[in-house]
Amino acid sequence: MEYLNPIIGGSLAGLLIAVMLGPVFFVLLQTSLKRGFKSAVFFALGIVTSDTMFTGIAYIGVSSFLNPVKAKPWMTLIGGGFMVFYGIFMFFKKKQIEGAVPKESSTEPLKNFFAGWFFNSINPTAFFYWVVVVTAVTGKYEGNPNQIFIFFVACMGMVFGTDILKAYLADRLKTIVTPTVLHRINQISGLVLFCAGSKLLFDAYKMFFT
């Protein structure tokens, strides 16, 4: 019973994260459609590695010397700028010729892994989200390292598992995904990234000037 509560709590927290359709979700979907399920698995592995890195930073207290209050505006500005740039690129990317959607030749595991890690890591919201979660969970379990560890193992397991499921379902649907549909997905992904980045840039502006 001592470890049942953190397992359930971590699984529910991971499921909550899984249903949030943030910018990284759309890039994961695009990766699965363009490069296949295997590439999307490594992309998802990069995402969960980034999340694990954030929780580790928060837990071991590195965030105390990297002052979150001082670092947040710059992280927000850089992450927002990249999202806006890449969102514009995706939105205006040329539509492919009609026919079967071709798979990209690049299925390099490391390339897809670091793509997932990078896209998740440039989002400052992810870092500060995990800081809040680590703080709350540490208080809930009164600093018990075993319970906290099990909570986050369950949480990350759920996040990774649901990302794999999303990638699998997207890959199964590739037969009905025409270049037109993929083009629309690119545009939606671009808009989501652009809006998320614009919001971050606006937040950074407020942090610097208020």
Image (cartoon, rainbow, N blue to C red):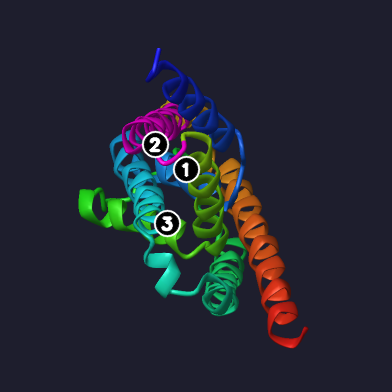
Amino acid at pointer 2: Ile
Instruction: Find out whether the residues at labels 1 and 2 contact each other: C-beta distance under 8 Å.
Output: yes
Q: Is residue 103 visible?
A: no
For mark 3, does the 10 Å Cα neighbourhood hold few (<14), some (14 to 19), or many (20 or more) residues? many
Q: Is residue 198 visible?
A: yes
Residue furthest to the front in view is 142
**In this figure, which residue is indicated by the disc labeled 1?**
138
Q: Residue at x 25, y 48 (%)?
A: 107
**In this figure, which residue is indicated by the disc labeled 2?**
148
Q: Residue at x 58, y 74 (%)?
A: 69
| Quadrant (top left, top right, bottom left, bottom right) of the N terminus | top left
For mark 1, does the 10 Å Cα neighbourhood hold few (<14), some (14 to 19), or many (20 or more) residues? some
- Dot 2 lies on which element? helix
For mark 2, does the 10 Å Cα neighbourhood hold few (<14), some (14 to 19), or many (20 or more) residues? many
Q: CA distance from mark 3 to mark 2?
A: 12 Å
Amino acid at pointer 1: Thr
Q: Residue at x 53, y 35 (%)?
A: 140
Look at the image and say whether residue 165 sits in the magenta stretch. yes
Amino acid at pointer 3: Ala
Residue 38 place in picture, x, y as percent: 28, 36
Q: CA distance from mark 1 to mark 3?
A: 11 Å
Q: Is residue 89 above or below residue 27?
A: below
| Quadrant (top left, top right, bottom left, bottom right) of the C terminus | bottom right
Nearest the viewer among 123 and 175 is 123
Magenta segment, principal secondary structure? helix
Mark sitting earlier along the chain (1/2): 1
Residue 53 place in picture, x, y as percent: 34, 54
**In this figure, which residue is indicated by the disc labeled 3?**
58
Residue furthest to the right in view is 210
Q: Residue at x 50, y 39 (%)?
A: 137
Residue 48 place in picture, x, y as percent: 37, 44
Q: Which residues are magenta?
A: 142-167
